[in-house]
Amino acid sequence: MENTQSVRETTAIVLPSLDPDQKFAAVVKGLVEDGFEHIIIVDDGSDAAHQRWFDEAEQYPACTVIHHGVNKGKGRALKTAFAHVRESLPELKGVITIDGDGQHLLEDIVACGERMLGEGNKVVLGCRDFDLPGVPPRSVAGNKTTSRLFRLLYGIRLSDTQTGLRAIPRACLPLFERVEGERFEYETNMLLAMKRAGIQLLEQPITTVYDPEDYSSHYNAVKDSWRIFRIMFKGLFRRS
């Protein structure tokens, strides 16, 4: 229990969000009630109709909301949060990135953070099982395709290349602030940057959560997949 508590005290939750809804509010409330002391939320240019959810989050002392005036993309939102933690929260040992749609359960968030704290300067990825029934076909196709390409092109074996649940040691934040990519392709670039820098990746199995009747995503299957594949092939010719 002592180590579990240290996750809540010594890591920051990083939560980028665009036009959130009640699921976002439930995620924030759950984190606060579970005892997380540092929750960094980045409003990535949400419209006026969705600002109430950020206003509600700011009522919690544990929450800090950073606003982008316009939509800049998930990659930029993550980098904004990383810079804030590095500059304003020097006592923290790392961050845990999550999504605001309820796909990441509290016990899995804690498990990834615990493992990161116990393993030193290694990044922990919360990995879903895409062979389970009920997973949206576009998620299965996208992840399995990128997993095969990672293995073929880079020799990296990952079962979930697009997971948003990542526990990252503080020492890695300066590198990730410099990684290219402003939108969904950024998370792929992070993996390639870790490969080049010799940072070890660890997979932590997590619960696969999808609501088939209410599945939504800001991921554009064509546009964002093209960005990801382009980044992967471009990375073959980069040496540093």
Image (cartoon, helix red, strand yellow):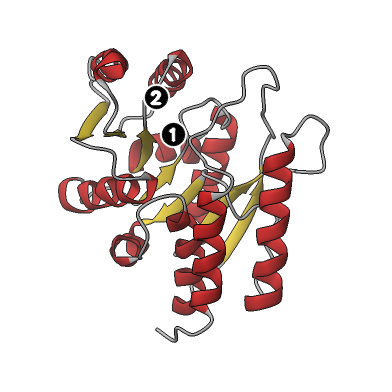
- At label 1, the amino acid type is Gln
Q: Position of residue 182 (x, y in %)?
A: 35, 54
Q: Is residue 238 above or below residue 166?
A: below
Quarter of the image for residue 63 reads top left
Q: Position of residue 156 (x, y in %)?
A: 65, 71
Image quadrant holding the C terminus, namely: bottom left
> Which residue is more in the foreground, 87 or 8?
87
Quarter of the image for residue 130 reads top right
Q: Position of residue 105 (x, y in %)?
A: 58, 29
Q: Residue at x 27, y 13 (%)?
A: 52
- Which label was assigned to residue 35? 2
36 with respect to 194 (left or right)? left
> Which residue is more in the foreground, 203 or 76?
76
Q: CA distance from mark 1 to mark 2?
A: 8 Å
Q: Residue at x 67, y 42 (%)?
A: 139
73 with respect to 238 (left or right)? left
Q: Earlier in the sequence, mark 1 or mark 2?
A: 1
Badge 1 marks a residue whose secondary structure is: helix
> Which residue is more in the foreground, 155 or 68?
68
Q: Position of residue 206 (x, y in %)?
A: 66, 40
- Which label was assigned to residue 5? 1
Q: Is residue 79 above or below residue 69?
A: below
Badge 2 marks a residue whose secondary structure is: loop
Quarter of the image for residue 18 reads top left
- Which label was assigned to residue 79? none
- At label 2, the amino acid type is Gly
Q: Residue at x 49, y 67 (%)?
A: 231
